[in-house]
Image: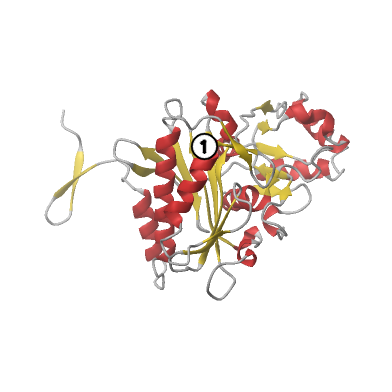
Amino acid sequence: MADQGVLIGREGAWHPAGRQRIMTLGRHIDEGEREHPGATGDFSGLLSDLAIAIKLIWREVSKAGLIEIIGATDCRNESGDEIKKLDEFANETIYKAMDHGGHLCVMASEESQGLISIPDRYPKGKYVLVYDPIDGSSNIDANVSIGSIFGIYRRVTASGPGTEEDCLQPGYRLAAAAYVIYGSSTIFVYCTGGGVHGFTLDPSVGEFLLSHENIGIPKRGKTYSVNEGNYTRWNEHFRRYIDYLKAEDPSGERPYTSRYIGSLVADLHRNMLHGGIFLYPGDATHPDGKLRLVYECAPLAYIVEHAGGRASDGRRRILDIMPEDIHQRTPLIIGSEDDVTMAEEFIQGKGDSLG
């Protein structure tokens, strides 16, 4: 039987009924630009360059078992972590894709010691890019999902090369943020201040296609993601919170299920779609936590809040924290609004009656 369709327009063009439109990432960016009549195209160009960098990284990640990018280099990044070969490749790829477009004045990366300057021969733009080129790279040897995280700010200096002042901005000033998951499929999730949208890469045509429109995180979930190997290092309030999640509840709301991948973006993305909470608190060994405020926590908090969730260090909203150093660390409690609020109550010693 022929497909059922409808006739549209005066010329009777055929349109398949009930089928979704095909929306590429590029078209979505262009449509967003048209909503701002005064737009110069710089921001759209920046996002398009970023999409190219992601495709190049995906190409190498998908061949990770066949080429020499698995394993470690002899270097460590500014945070003291061993730099994996894939981290090094991704860091350089993003830089090469973004340094000459004229959209950026400066960049900063988790894998680079200081600021990443735009070469003198290229024009300086009005935006700043901060990024974690590969999140969870230690997992790639086991074929576990990894990712990338990006934050885009408008510069605060007037002109010329960007400075540290341009990079050290609180998260609420972000102009856009994005994360990518390289897994069974490659998904690009981004937000420019409106909705949060996800695009899945179709390798056969080399395009990101809209697959998750207007993502909204449930107000509460039934899963938690935390490295329980650190249990003995946590303070009493945080241990009590985890014990509370694991305890039976007559109402059936608990116990929560533990789901911990060890790749921040992968754990977060699952919670974005189904609800839940991710936690990386400070502990006796790392009182300020291990995650980086500028490259990881602020961009993800921006996305989660625009999807209806919440992000905190246990006491403060992540987006309100003014960074003092580009490699600054912070505890992170992020996910469904009600779950994060309850975690904050325990962390602040107000949830003892519940536990």
Q: Which residue is mark 1?
A: 86
Residue 154 lies, with reference to residue 251, above or below; the image says: below
Q: Where is residue 285, by image quadrant?
A: top right
Q: Position of residue 289 (x, y in %)?
A: 75, 43
Q: Residue at x 51, y 30 (%)?
A: 70
Q: How many badges with numbers are in the image?
A: 1
Mark 1: give few (<14), some (14-19) or many (20+) Cα within 10 Å.
many
Q: Residue at x 70, y 33 (%)?
A: 226
Q: Quadrant of the N terminus?
A: top left
Q: Where is residue 331, by image quadrant?
A: top right
Residue furthest to the bottom in view is 158
Residue sitting nearer the eye, 186 or 243: 186
Q: Residue at x 63, y 50 (%)?
A: 301
In this picture the colour scheme is secondary structure
Q: Position of residue 171 (x, y in %)?
A: 64, 58
Residue sitting nearer the eye, 255 or 24: 24
Residue 340 lies, with reference to residue 36, above or below; the image says: above
Residue furthest to the left in view is 11
Residue type indicated by callout 1 = Leu
Residue sitting nearer the eye, 14 or 29: 29
Q: Position of residue 162 (x, y in %)?
A: 56, 67
- Secondary structure at badge 1 equals helix
Q: Quadrant of the C terminus?
A: top right
Q: For residue 214, say whether it is visible.
A: no
Q: Residue at x 56, y 76 (%)?
A: 158
Residue sitting nearer the eye, 225 or 328: 328
Relative side of 21 to 50, left or right: left
Q: Position of residue 283 (x, y in %)?
A: 81, 38
